[in-house]
Image (tube, rainbow, N blue to C red):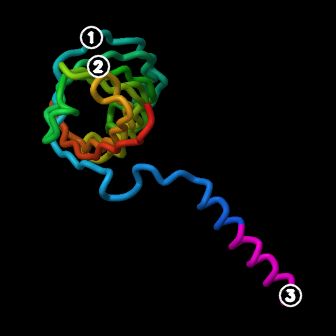
Amino acid sequence: MKGKTRRLVVLVLVVAVLTALVPATGLTQGNKTYFTGIECWVADLDPGIWEELGDGNWRITGWQLQATEEMTDPRITGDSYIVASGILDLVVGSGHMQGTLELVNDQGSWFGHWTMRAESWTEGDIHAILNGSGAYEGLVANYHYGPGDDCSPASGYIVETGGE
């Protein structure tokens, strides 16, 4: 019994120390500004490389797209440039993709990475984390996109990290 108690005490102390060491900047509700809106496809800029793998699966590398972001927060509204790579089943629309996203407007820009998981053409989600520059220096945007045709619903929040 003493061995189990000792392990429990050590575990609690480790968790307490790690909690104290992890910065909590931006994690409080007061530092988050929530937004909603839509992302609409504008154009395919470069098809990249599409390699058929069989059974409806394709490997896509370097697909470049342009979209517009219309959000309730003007800081995260503008033109976006997306680079996508991954493997998709084009028959059912399932697969995983990832890439980069740059959003640009008159006050600055955002750049970051995104990942997508899809079960079908109508079920799946995309998550993106973007770092701001220009007037948005020190800000981080956390995005979530839902499924859509030419336009997809989006929501998320902007966090002030306090860093430059």
Question: What is the CA distance from the residue labelled 2 to the residue labelled 1?
Answer: 9 Å
Q: Are marks 2 and 1 in contact (CB under 8 Å)?
A: yes
Instruction: Identify the residue position indicated by label 3 in the image.
Output: 2
Counting residues from the start of the chain, the first of labels 2 and 3 encountered is 3
As for residue 5 lying within the magenta part, the answer is yes
Quick check: 107 above or below 72? above
Q: Nearer the viewer, mark 2 or mark 3?
A: 3
The span shown in magenta is 1-13
Residue 7 position, x and y percent, is: 79, 76
SS category of the residue bearing label 2: strand
Q: What residue did someone put label 1 on?
A: 45
Mark 3 is surrounded, within 10 Å at the Cα level, by few (under 14), some (14 to 19) or many (20 or more) other residues, namely few
Q: Which mark is residue 81?
A: 2
Q: Amino acid at mark 2?
A: Tyr
User: Taking 82 as reference, is 73 left or right?
Assistant: left
Q: Quadrant of residue 6?
A: bottom right
Q: Residue at x 25, y 44 (%)?
A: 146
Using the numbered discs, state the Cα–Cα distance from disc 2 to disc 3 in whole angstroms. Answer: 59 Å
Instruction: Point out residue 85 in the picture as x, y percentages from the top left corner.
Output: 43, 24
